Amino acid sequence: MVTVEADAFCGPLLARKAAEAGVVYSLAYGDQPALICDLVDWARAAGFPVVAAGRGHKWLPHFAQSTPETVWGHYGLTPEQASVGGLNPKMFNSFLDGSKPAIEATAVCNATGLTPAPGGLLYPPGAVDEIPTLMRPREEGGVLHHKGQVEVISSLRANGEPIPYDIRFGVFVVFEGDTEYIRRCFMEYGVKTDATGRYACLYKRWHLIGLEVGISVASVGLRGEPTGCATGWRADAVAVSKKDLKPGEILDGEGGYTVVGRLMPAADSLAQGCLPLGLAHGWKLLRPVAAGQPVRWSDVAFDANATAVKLRREMESSVAPGSGISLYGPPRREGASAPHAIAAASR
C-alpha cells in the first residue's frame, strides 16, 4: 500500500480482507509510517516498553489554516520558484497544514497498537536530543497524555526559530528502561536519555520515499511479513473546517481551502459521526460548520452508492474501534526471521 491516505481511510478493513484472501497487506517502507512501525517493532522485540513514537514536521499552529495561496510563504519559496519546480501547491499544503501528519499518525496507530491523545497531535518543538524529555507523561515533566502515544515533533520553536539538529524529515521511538539495570546500561553505553535516565530514543533523521520500498518487497516475498499492517482500528483522520463553512459550499479535500485533517481516536470519530478526511472532497455542505469543528456525515450530501463510501461504511459497521484483527496471511518460510511476529507476541 503505497498510498497511506487509503490506509488511514480503511486500512483495518483492507488488512482483514487481505488476511481472509491469504495474502500479505503491507505499508511501504521508505514512507514514514512503515519506518516508525519498524522502530516500534525493534523496541518491543528487544523487550523495551514503547512510550511514544512518531515523526517530525515543520509546524506552527497557524499552519492549520494555510491554503494553496499561502503555502509557499510558509515553505520559504516564492510562487515563481514553486512553478519552476513544478510543485503542486495543494499537495504541498496538505503536508504543511497537518493533514499528512494526521493521516500518517492514523496508519501508525492502527498498525502498532499505539493510540492518539484525545485532542489529536500536539506538535511539541524539540531537537533530537530533547525527544526523550518531551516524550514523557505530563506528570513526569513531558507532554504526553499517556504512555503508548503517537506524536509529531516540530522543527520550529514557538517563535518560528528553526531548531538545530531537528527530526523534521525523520522518525523516532521513545522507549523506557523499566529496571535499574537497564537504566545503568543506558548510562554505560552512552545512550542519550532524559534527566532521570529512564527514557531513551532511537531515531532516523530521514526517509527515502520510493527508494526504500524494496525492503517491503523483500520482507513480504521472502518472509511473508508486512513492513507495517493495521492490526485494529484505533485512530482516524477526520475532516475539520479551516474556516466558518456555509451551506452550499463544496469541500475540496486535504490541502485545500475548506478542511484540514485531525488525528482522533477511532471510537470518538465513530461516536461523533465524523467525516473521514478521505471523503471530504466534492461533497456539498447541508449545514454550517464553525471553524475548527469536525465535519460530520450529517453535514454533507454524500453519495451512499459511491465505492469509497460503501467501503468505509463496511469498516464502520464491521470493525469495532480498539478491537484486534486476525491478520496472518501465508505462513512464513521455514527458518525465516520474524521481528514483526516477535514484536506482536510481546504486545
Image: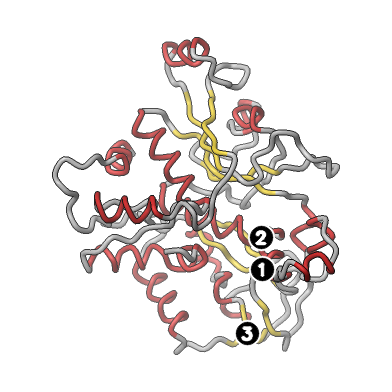
Marks 2 and 1, how far apart at CA: 7 Å
Q: What label sits on residue 151 in the rendered view?
A: none
Marks 3 and 2, how far apart at CA: 20 Å
Question: Looking at the image, which is closer to me, 188 or 125?
Answer: 188
Give the residue drawn at x 28%, y 38%. 342
Q: Which amino acid type corresponds to the residue marked 2 in the rendered image?
A: Phe
Give the residue drawn at x 86%, y 42%. 159
Q: For the residue carrying disc 2, how many other residues have a C-alpha within 10 Å: few (<14), some (14-19), or many (20+)? A: some
Count the marks. Answer: 3
Considering only vertical position in the picture, is 186 above or below 139? above
Residue 156 place in picture, x, y as percent: 77, 42
The answer to whether mark 2 and mark 1 are in CB contact below 8 A is yes
Quarter of the image for residue 132 reads top right
Give the residue drawn at x 41%, y 28%. 48
Report the residue that reaches farthest toward the left: 334
Which residue is disc 1 drawn over?
Answer: 91
Considering only vertical position in the picture, is 288 above or below 8? below
The answer to whether mark 3 and mark 2 are in CB contact below 8 A is no
Residue 269 place in picture, x, y as percent: 53, 64
Q: Which amino acid type corresponds to the residue marked 3 in the rendered image?
A: Gly
Q: Is residue 151 left or right of residue 250?
A: left
Q: Is residue 172 left or right of residue 322?
A: right
Instruction: Give the foreground label among 3 and 2.
Output: 2
Question: Looking at the image, which is closer to me, 217 or 176?
Answer: 217
Q: Secondary structure at mark 2?
A: helix
Which residue is disc 3 drawn over?
Answer: 282
Which residue is disc 2 drawn over?
Answer: 95
Give the residue drawn at x 69%, y 69%. 255
Marks 1 and 3, how far apart at CA: 16 Å
Residue 23 place in picture, x, y as percent: 25, 64
